[in-house]
Image (cartoon, rainbow, N blue to C red):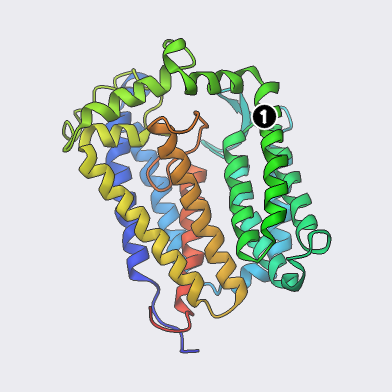
Amino acid sequence: MEGRRSFDVLLFTAVLCLLVIGMLTVYSASSAWGMHLENDPFYFVKRQLLFAGTGVALMIGISYIDYWTWQRWSVVILIVCFALVILVLIPGIGIVRGGARSWIGVGAFSIQPAEFMKLGMIIFLSHYIVLRQRWMTHFRKGMLPALMLMFLAFGLIMLQPDLGTGTVMLGTCFVLLFAAGAKILHFIYLGLIGVAGFVFLIVSAPYRMARITSFIDPWSDPLNTGFQIIQSLYAVGPGGLFGLGFGESRQKFYYLPEPQTDFIFSILAEETGFIGGAFVLVLFGMVLWRGVVTALHAPDLFGSFLAIGVTGVIFIQVMINIGVVIGLFPVTGITLPFLSYGGSSLTLMLLAVGIVLNITRHRMRVS
């Protein structure tokens, strides 16, 4: 193994480019809402600058901390994440927004414990797989303990409720188990159980059922459950090849609810068109490519699985978010990594990239 070298410049550059694009789009998408709510068109982008600045500082700082540190503290990290997810459920501590008790207030800001749980599960599961690698093809000795922990975390997140974040966490964990060599037959059985479970979760909550029906036919209720997806398509469609121009979005003027968060890609597509949207996808593709390369050339299994987990959570969120925006998936409330407005999500994603950047410092050969 060669000595330590500088971190992956391509990955770092791609993430910074996404951050800059996100900052510009957050400003454009939120200026009308900022003026309406706070009499300040820069209200959201100023807060986003604070989140991004904190996140980039953490990303660079974390890139100098040997990733083996996270392996040593993986159990403690997971316990803290579970404590936060439980704490948010306590009335008076957890803050309710949009019908979900998902935030804890910290001064003038708030944190979302479920976001911490995603990273905590990636770190712990990577450590668990290394310890139990010889048993990963064995369901009872390998997969079952991991599954019990995963579904416990998922259940606590669902009590908020937050199906979107829980789904991303589970999906990332399954990617890690698949990479660890778990049997395909086990995934088939789990898939059947999972489908039945998701059907139950959807049927048991009227608002989730409404999201499914509006996904199938948004025009059946265009002013209520189908409103978001219809307005999103009204943004994406007129964008055409080159878009309407920066700041020229029409849907941001109170048509598309909170366009700076889950539906920020709609505004980006409306203003920059197919070219702008495709360029963002290329940048995400570069992040995916460098993440896979890092996993392949990591000096040990823990580094490989850690890189796979972080890359997986980014890719799954991008896939679901853009799928929702263009009408391929029901509305789930998933942010677009590095672009959407939000403190916990943005900061945690940048911190996670910092861990991957440290792994690249130790990679086995130049790639």
Can I make out residue 64 in this image? no
Up-down relation of residue 324 to residue 252 (above or below): below
CA neighbours of label 1 inside 10 A, class few (<14), some (14 to 19), many (20+): few
Quadrant housing the C terminus: bottom left
Label 1: element kind:
helix
Extreme residue toward the right, this view: 140
Up-down relation of residue 19 to residue 309 (above or below): above
Q: Which residue is mark 1?
A: 199
Residue beneath the point at 31% across and 27% down: 40
Residue beneath the point at 67% across and 22% down: 203
Expressed as whole percent of the image width and height from the top left, the position of residue 204 reads: 70, 22
* Residue 268 sits in quarter: top left
The residue lying toward the viewer, choosing from 167 and 37, is 167
Expressed as whole percent of the image width and height from the top left, the position of residue 213 reads: 53, 19
Expressed as whole percent of the image width and height from the top left, the position of residue 159 reads: 71, 32
* Residue 90 sits in quarter: top right
Residue beneath the point at 36% across and 35% down: 264
Give amino acid for label 1.
Val
